[in-house]
Image (cartoon, rainbow, N blue to C red):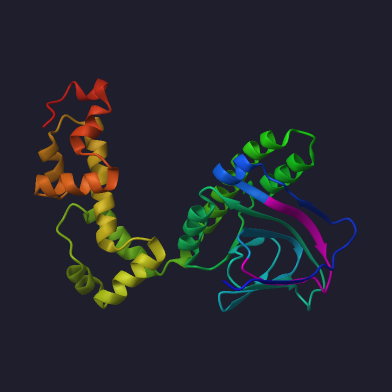
Amino acid sequence: MATHSYCVLDYTEDSTWQVISATGFAKESLVYTTDIGNFYSRQDYSTDREGLNSLLVKLTLSGEGYLHYGNQSYTLKPGQFFWIDCLSPQVYGTSKTHGSWHVIWLHFVGGAARSYYSLFLKNTGNKPVATLPLNSPALNLIQELADLYASPREQLEKDVYASSLITQLMVALISASAASSENIPTVVQEIRSFLLTHYTEKITLSSLSAQFNLNQFYLQKQFKRYLGQSPTEYVIYLRLKQAKELMLTSQLSISEISYAVGIENTSHFTRQFKAQEGMTPQEFRKLWPVIAEKRDIH
């Protein structure tokens, strides 16, 4: 992959930028920060970059910025943030019409960071920009990270604690993106609502297509784009989720549970359950002996 980076670091003297040297343990096992900053950016501040193995979050506190990413352009106003993968081409900086942009930001990578990032993009419809709710802990978490790295604590201790804070930050950003349900087209929301209440019935892509008057290919593509699963995968997920609840809270046999969640063939149910959970329904029940001993396990 091509790598380039061109930056104009036009910010005031009271701005801060901490470059972090994470321990080998953090780099191997944790999500960790490479650098973090609080920039009072002036008019000429900008970055043009590609090929950096890092995720970047920038939160606008005041002023206005811009972002060009994924062939789209965005304006960043107070309360808005962007979350991007710096492997991809990106250009961002202070809005020329405003002349200042106060941002708090961090680069991080490792662990399950990119999996969290995928959840964020699923909520936003692949848009890198979202708005923080007023009660979001994200700003405080970034500030706590900055204070942590400025403290005299031992580096490994910092890395372990920082990993927890970064994970909380990612959850807060995902929560902020999920709050914007308008990002999901109405018809996709309607299909999801229908499946939530009818997943035990016989549902095919063809029947969904006819019911919602959509082309089958388009329906499947849109559903997977916004929810991360095809309609069929979503139905299987709902059925097996309910099956696990019934295994833990009822005395129904495995075959009865299979039928109750809409899978009439018990062998097929067992195969699907094992594919998702890594164990058979019988093995799953045996993990809960206090409850399982009261049942007739088939």
Q: Say if the magenta span includes residue 41.
A: yes
Residue 254 locus on image (x, y percent): 14, 37
Q: Say if the magenta span includes residue 259.
A: no
Residue 288 locus on image (x, y percent): 27, 26
* Res. 187 in view: no
Residue 140 lies in what quarter of the image? top right
Is 62 left, or right, of 218 in this rendering?
right
Residue 13 locus on image (x, y percent): 90, 59
User: In the image, is residue 296 above or below residue 195?
Assistant: above
User: In the image, is residue 99 above or below residue 58?
Assistant: below
| Residues drawn in magenta | 34-51
Q: Main secondary structure of the magenta part?
A: strand
Residue farthest along the right direction in this orientation: 13
In what quadrant of the picture does the N terminus appear?
A: bottom right
In what quadrant of the picture does the C terminus appear?
A: top left
Number of callouts in the render? 0
The one nearer the camera, 34 or 15, is: 34
Residue at image point 25% right, 43% down: 242
Is 230 left, or right, of 173 in this rendering?
left
Is 112 left, or right, of 8 in this rendering?
left
Residue 209 lies in what quarter of the image? bottom left
Residue at image point 45% right, 62% down: 122
